[in-house]
Amino acid sequence: MDIRNIAIIAHVDHGKTTLVDQLLRQSGSFRENQVVAERAMDRNDLERERGITILAKCTSVVWKNTRINIIDTPGHADFGGEVERILNMVDGAIVLVDAAEGALPQTKFVLTKALARGIKPIVVVNKVDRQDARPDEVHTEMFDLFAALGANDEQLDFPMLFASGRQGWADIELNGPKKDLAPLYDLVLSHVKPPNLDKDAPFAMVASILEADPFLGRVLTGRVEQGRARTNMPVRVLRADGTVVETGRLTKLLSFRGLERVPADEVEAGDIVAVAGLSEATIPETIASPEVTAALPAIPVDPPTLSMTFRLNDGPLGGREGKKVTSRQIRDRLFKEVEGNVAIRVSESPESEAFEVAGRGELQLGVLIEQMRREGFELTIGRPRVLTRQNEETGDREEPFEEVLVDVDEAFSGIVVEKMSIRKGQMQDMRPSGGGKVRLTFIIPSRGLIGYHGEFLTDTRGTGIMNRLFAGYQPWAGTIEGRTKGSLISSEDGAAVQYALWYLQERGVLFVDPGEKVYVGMILGEHSRGSDLEINPIKEKKLTNIRAAGKDDAMLLVPPRRMSLEQAIAYIEDDELVEVTPSAIRIRKRYLDPNQRKRAEKKGDSAA
């Protein structure tokens, strides 16, 4: 059977996973009466809750006696590492672009990587059924983007389809019959070349996806680059420098058939396959026959730009809500994550019982923390920091910058430009995008965006859309103003009391409800002024024998501000930590004892 290997790449929310649903349905992968969940490829709980793809996944369909292996990739810039290594496995790509939003930063990122690999993409303008769709303009935008990214003549002559993934049709003409996805299938067969690989050479493949299976152990997925693999054949695993990691046997070969993985006795060059039986192999090592001595080339992944400190939970409530609370357990879990996630780096921290975890962005590290929290871990997280570097030629300190694309109503463009300039952002472009909206483009230091997203949504009344993309390193931009408000800090241990909170809420915005456990050094709210204030949240009303009819009934509290994990991480300052447990997210000072805090402040002032 002929094989085609393609990846579906696009910006977040442009409809990749929905389109894969329809491709599976129309190829006959499901029975007529089979119940299949929407976004069937998003199997992870976090993916379903957030509505985004986090991990790249493989599936396959059969069309006109040709097997099409399809890889669904994440669309968020923070998970770009997943996309980079996946492109090593495919010969073609479908670039999906929203008919209203057009080419956004992640579209540009994935297209850059695909063009550099020599892939000739197929462009699909999706969601043409939207009321604000502008498909012809988006087609022109995509051609300009291809040209700007240095596409060759063959790549510039890209085929294009108009489609609606939700309605399940694609067509060459915008006013075509809009019947089904057959034009897309046929275009894949005619435009994407079958893999041209040596089937008679010794077996070799590069591991591109790693996952843990409760029955099979480590399962590694990749494309067979040469030769044939058979069940139980002996193999060895090679690093990039040719050193041997381990030797073993392929106890299981699994081919992709729809949403299932089916055991296979033999696979040949060009097919995408999952293998089991190896205990140490990881990404991007080469799995090959014993006679192969050199590792296959693997795509280098862009380095991380952001770092956080993961510490054990040493607060007064530590160990009460989670099952995994020791630094050894945290260390093992983090190094296990590194094996399957090439975009994350973990190193020992100068602090005791702490680890430095570097990644692409707040969302990527936030997803890792949320996964650990659900697994029963307790930990405290420090403020995100950007990773700087020294320019070898000039000796200057450089920091990561990002390209930010903002779509806002015209009425809110002024406040966005003002806030961006305060955070050292430089406006590159400003143009109307239709419907009373303006599209603004900025280049801004990555650290200037830490904690800004929530403020941006408040400023734009929840109507603004912000997309970001790593734009490279530039000279250090100088000091950026942080949070302007201080903290309300608990001075007592115990449970918060309504009587005390009622009097304290005029001091600022509270984060806790009556009855919640609090401890010395825990942050209970945001002070209305720029300084920190210590408060007593457990103070109770003094009882007397004089009746006060109805006075206590009037003590109505303003609902507290509840922060998600990402919001809490973005909110904290350098001297604060986020305490994460399976049942709670709290914010606290790094030093709980007020005397220690004062000593640390004096030390910081003298160092400055």
Image: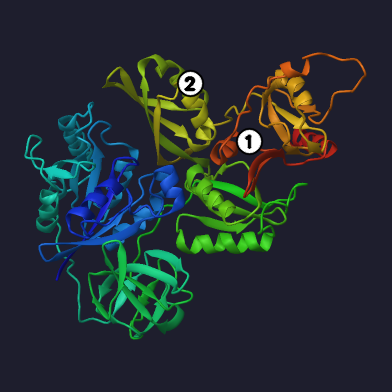
Report the quarter where the C terminus lies: top right
Q: Position of residue 43 (x, y in %)?
A: 39, 55
Residue in the image at 66% along x and 31% along y: 511
Residue type highlighted by circle 2: Asp
Element class at badge 1: loop
Residue in the image at 52% along x and 56% along y: 345
Q: Position of residue 568 (x, y in %)?
A: 59, 37
Regarding residue 478, the answer to whether it shows in the image is yes
Q: Is residue 461 left or right of residue 127?
A: right
Q: Is residue 55 left or right of residue 331?
A: left
Residue tagged 2: 459
Element class at badge 2: helix
- Residue density around tag 1, few if under 14, some if 14–19, many if 20 or more, within 10 Å: many
Regarding residue 392, the answer to whether it shows in the image is no
* Residue closer to the observer: 421 or 31: 31
State whether residue 87 is above or below residue 442: below
Q: Position of residue 478 (x, y in %)?
A: 56, 31
Residue tagged 1: 572
State whether residue 217 is above or below residue 8: below
Residue type highlighted by circle 1: Ile
Q: Is residue 501 left or right of residue 101?
A: right
Q: Position of residue 487 (x, y in %)?
A: 70, 28
Residue in the image at 26% along x and 71% along y: 225
